[in-house]
Image (cartoon, helix red, strand yellow):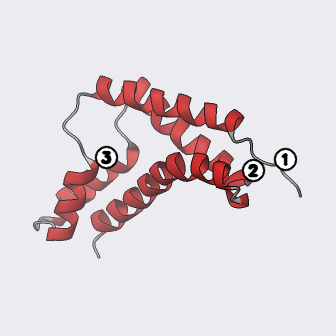
């Protein structure tokens, strides 16, 4: 696995965590799944989406995207088919302002989920 492929895999895992949480938190709150109220898990989810939204509002491309592109450029060989397919799935042809609007809306939804499906208090 090349460095660019490793960054792509990490990027995909973070995206799956973020998007999965958007569905699992309200569903788990409704179904009574205790893990969706885990304080640290929820805080990580909120912080992760907050960073994504802040980067977009500031007009910055995700640092993982930049890092992957730099590593892929140094590799000099074409990416494997799986990497190209994943690239097409996670990198949409939108202007940065479109991502900013989308990410801020999603971050607002996650903040609303914090109150609609509140996490348990953190314990030591």
Please give the name of the residue rendered at 51% of the width and 46% of the height, measured from the top-left corner: 22
Q: Which mark is residue 11?
A: none
Task: Give the residue number, with chain letter if any, for mark 2.
Answer: 39
- Whether residues under marks 1 and 2 lie with C-beta atoms below 8 angstroms apart, the answer is yes
| Of residues 57 and 107, the one drawn nearer to the viewer in this rendering | 107
Q: Can residue 58 be seen from the camera position used here?
A: no
The kind of secondary structure element at disc 1 is loop
In this rendering, the count of numbered labels is: 3
The kind of secondary structure element at disc 2 is helix
Q: Residues within 10 Å of mark 2 (few under 14, many from 20)?
A: some
The kind of secondary structure element at disc 3 is helix
Task: Give the residue number, with chain letter if any, for mark 1.
Answer: 121
Please give the name of the residue rendered at 46% of the width and 55% of the height, measured from the top-left corner: 14
Marks 1 and 2, how far apart at CA = 6 Å
Q: Quadrant of residue 48?
A: top right
The image shows residue 27 at horizontal and vertical percentages of 58, 51
Residue 118 appears left or right of 109: right
Q: Can residue 36 be seen from the camera position used here?
A: yes
The image shows residue 23 at horizontal and vertical percentages of 51, 49
Q: Residues within 10 Å of mark 1 (few under 14, many from 20)?
A: few
From what the image shows, is residue 83 above or below residue 117? below
Task: Give the residue number, with chain letter if any, for mark 3.
Answer: 66
Marks 1 and 3, how far apart at CA = 36 Å
Give the farthest residue toward the bottom. Answer: 1
Please give the name of the residue rendered at 14% of the width and 69% of the height, measured from the top-left corner: 81
The C terminus lies in which quarter of the figure? bottom right
Residue 49 appears left or right of 87: right
Sequence-wise, the earlier of marks 1 and 2 is: 2
Foreground mark, 1 or 3, reads 1
């Amino acid at each position: 696995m090349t460095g660019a492929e490793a960054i792509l895999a990490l990027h995909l895992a973070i995206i799956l965590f973020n998007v999965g949480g958007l569905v699992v938190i309200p569903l788990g709150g409704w179904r009574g799944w205790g893990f969706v109220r885990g304080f640290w898990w929820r805080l990580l989810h909120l912080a992760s989406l907050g960073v994504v939204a802040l980067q977009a509002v500031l007009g910055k491309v995700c640092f993982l995207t930049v890092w992957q592109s730099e590593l892929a450029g140094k590799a000099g060989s074409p990416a494997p088919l799986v990497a190209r397919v994943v690239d097409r799935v996670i990198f949409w042809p939108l202007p940065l302002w479109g991502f900013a609007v989308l990410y801020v809306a999603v971050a607002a939804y996650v903040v609303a989920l914090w109150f609609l499906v509140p996490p348990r208090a953190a314990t030591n």
